[in-house]
Every structure is written in structure tokens, then in C-alpha cells.
Image: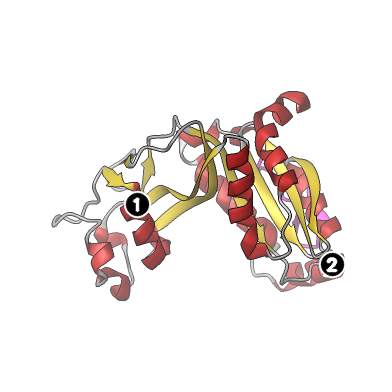
Amino acid sequence: MVKMMYQAVKPLLQAVQKVKVSEPEQFIEALQKAAQEMDLHTVTALPVSIVSRFEKIKSKVLQEKPVVKALYSPEGDTAESHELQRLHKSIEEAPSLFQTIDLTVVTSEMPQMLSYRSKRTHDYWKRLSDTEHISVMVKINDITVITCSPSQVEEELRKSSDGQWSVESDLRDDMRSKKENPLLRTKPYIVCYLLSPKKPCSDVVREMLEHYFEVRQFSLSRDLECLVGYAATLESVSLRSFYRKHNGAVQS
């Protein structure tokens, strides 16, 4: 099982291993370049969900933006077909209207026109139905600016209104949102955490990742490292239990 899991994501892991950068903001571009050298096609910020109806947008500021109005018909419904380039411009101005994949490995050049469907008329999201080109989904988290020693994680858990650690809940939210699209559940999933070796985050983040995934660690430079969790399919990742919750004890 572990071998099958590794084979599904091996090319992308090999690309991560080639990346040598010292700043987190350099990572995605460097990873794309490394992937390209291995003949892998990638797309950044691929929109996998769009808010389905104009009236579901509560922000008046967003409603007045021309790029937002252009997404919806006079009846308030978003189209079922969108041009990827135009969607990327919309994401820049109104990111809250979309759910995206940070980096997507695709089997060939991504089609420029993408189709979206909702299961029911009143669903909040229209979800991507053109998924046959998606090979691997990659989430990238820069946590170099935070400190997460075990004692600090415990402190956050005590103060949190829902008893959750924000780093873990962000990861779970991302996985849950993509699991809601049945066409994405069967895709391989990778999460990359960029960390500073000078801060005590590595051990606790590794423990969290091991709760959900197989894990690899890469040194990108003296000032930056990358912890990678991966699964052969997203549906194989169980969200039934938390790594840490409430009193900070491992939940199993």
C-alpha cells in the first residue's frame, strides 16, 4: 500500500527534492520549474469551486466589482463554462468567491474552458466537472512566520473557541472542501509545509502529518525546509479524528 502510494506521487516528490530556495515566496515558481524539467505540466490556483449565485455574495463591496458582476447572468446564476485565464483574474480581485488548488499537476495542457456544475439548485458552490486532466493536487503552506513548539500549540488549543489548532484545522478544511467534489476524491493529494529550521515547528508538524499521511522531509536551503505529507487518493485520508484537540492530547 505504501509503495503504491509513493508511486502515485513520486514524480512530484522528485521535483520537490530538486528545489533549492531560501525564501518561501520562491517555492512555487521553483517547484514549477523543477516539474517542467521532468516534463510535468502544472497549473497554479486552479479554481475547483465558484459561488453559484450572485445573491449568496454578502459583501456589497464585492458585489459592485465589475469582475464579479461579469461572472453572473442577469438572473444571478454563474455560467457553467468559464475561461481559465478570466477566472484567474477574478481570483486576484475576489478570492473568497473561489476554492482553489494551490498547485495542480495535470496530465497534459489544461483546457482553457472549464465546466462547473452544482448537484442541487440551491448549492452554495458550483464545482469543477473537468477533472480528467488533474493528476495530483498540491497544497502549499508557508508557516515560517509562526512558532509552534508543543507548549505553544497547547496554549493555542486552550484559547481556541473550538479546541482546534489553526494549522491542523486549515489543512482539514482544505481536504474536506475537495472531498465534497466526488471527482476530486480519487486524486492523489500532497501538502507541503515550508518551515524555518531555526524555529521549533518541525517535530509537531511532522507528528500532525503522520496522523494523516506518509511523510517526507526535504532541505531547501540552510534557512528553509519542506515537510511533505502525501496520499495516493484524497478519499483514503481519514478525517474522523484530530491530531490534537481540546487538551492537546493526541486524538485516536
Label 2 SS: loop
Can the viewer see residue 68? yes
CA distance separating discs 2 and 1: 41 Å
Q: Write the residue at 81% across / 71% down.
A: 152
In this picture, is 203 found above or below 16? below
If the image is split into quadrants, where does the N terminus sit? top right
What's the magenta bit mostly, secondary-structure-wise?
loop
Task: Determine which residue is flagged by label 1.
Answer: 85
Residue 52 in the figure: left or right of residue 148: left
What percent of the width, then of the height, locates residue 196?
Answer: 79, 65
Front in this rendered view, residue 231 or 29: 29
What percent of the width, then of the height, locates residue 190?
Answer: 65, 43
What percent of the width, then of the height, locates residue 224?
Answer: 77, 61
Residue 167 in the figure: left or right of residue 67: right
Residue 135 in the figure: left or right of residue 205: left
Q: Residue furthest left?
A: 74
- State which quadrant residue 231 falls in: top right
Front in this rendered view, residue 105 or 213: 105
How would you rate the neighbour count of disc 1 (Cα within 10 Å): few for under 14, some for 14-19, many for 20 or more? few
- State which quadrant residue 55 falls in: bottom left
Amino acid type for the residue under numbered disc 2 = Ser
Sequence order check, earlier mark of 2 and 1: 1
Question: Which segment did they paint magenta?
Answer: 238-252
If the image is split into quadrants, where does the C terminus sit? top right
Q: Write the residue at 68% across / 56% down.
A: 168
Amino acid type for the residue under numbered disc 1 = Gln
In this picture, is 226 found above or below 147? above
Tell me, for residue 149, which label it has, or none.
2
Front in this rendered view, residue 10 or 188: 10
Label 1 SS: helix
